[in-house]
Amino acid sequence: MSSDSPPHYDARIVIYTRQGCHCCESAEAIVRKFVSDITLVDIDSDSELTQKFNTSVPVVEINGKVRFRGKVSPMLLERTLKAEARQVAGPAS
């Protein structure tokens, strides 16, 4: 049986957002197609994060590394998640 849904990946995802941000909502929807466990952080709840990411949201962090700012490309996201999965798995035997 074939499925058109993309595979899910096991990765630590943090999306830095702010309320009322349409781009942030779009980024979350795209990421949720590939990863179910996502942490959302409202940058306006922390002055340091507001200063760091003010005009860059959404910011998507994958396994501790910032990978996207502003817009998330589904194709690039999937490639990044695949590469992260290979790094975690280690070299093939």
Image (cartoon, rainbow, N blue to C red):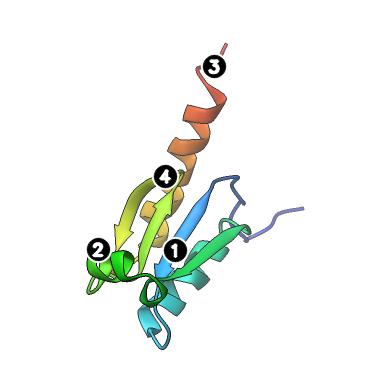
* Quadrant in the picture for residue 16: bottom left
- Say which residue label 4 marks: 64
Q: What residue lies at 61% left-to-right and 51% top-to-bottom?
A: 7
Counting other residues with Cα less than 10 Å from the Cα at mark 2, is it few (<14), some (14-19), or many (20 or more)? few
Task: From the image, state whether disc 3 or disc 1 is nearer to you.
Answer: 1
What's the residue type where badge 4 is placed?
Gly
Please report whichever mark, 3 or 4, sits nearer to the chain's N-terminal start. Answer: 4
Q: CA distance from mark 1 to mark 2?
A: 14 Å
Q: Which residue occupies the extreme right position in the image?
A: 1
- Say which residue label 2 marks: 52
Counting other residues with Cα less than 10 Å from the Cα at mark 1, is it few (<14), some (14-19), or many (20 or more)? many
Q: Which residue occupies the extreme front position in the image?
A: 47
Comparing 48 with 65, the one in front is: 48
- Say which residue label 1 marks: 15
Q: Are marks 3 and 4 in contact (CB under 8 Å)?
A: no
What's the residue type where badge 2 is placed?
Lys
- Say which residue label 3 marks: 92
Please report whichever mark, 1 or 2, sits nearer to the chain's N-terminal start. Answer: 1
Comparing 84 with 47, the one in front is: 47
Q: CA distance from mark 4 to mark 2?
A: 16 Å
Q: Are marks 3 and 1 in contact (CB under 8 Å)?
A: no
Please report whichever mark, 3 or 2, sits nearer to the chain's N-terminal start. Answer: 2
What's the residue type where badge 3 is placed?
Ala
What's the residue type where badge 1 is placed?
Ile
Q: Which residue occupies the extreme top position in the image?
A: 93
User: Is 34 above or below relative to 16?
Assistant: above
Q: What residue lies at 25% left-to-right and 73% top-to-bottom?
A: 54
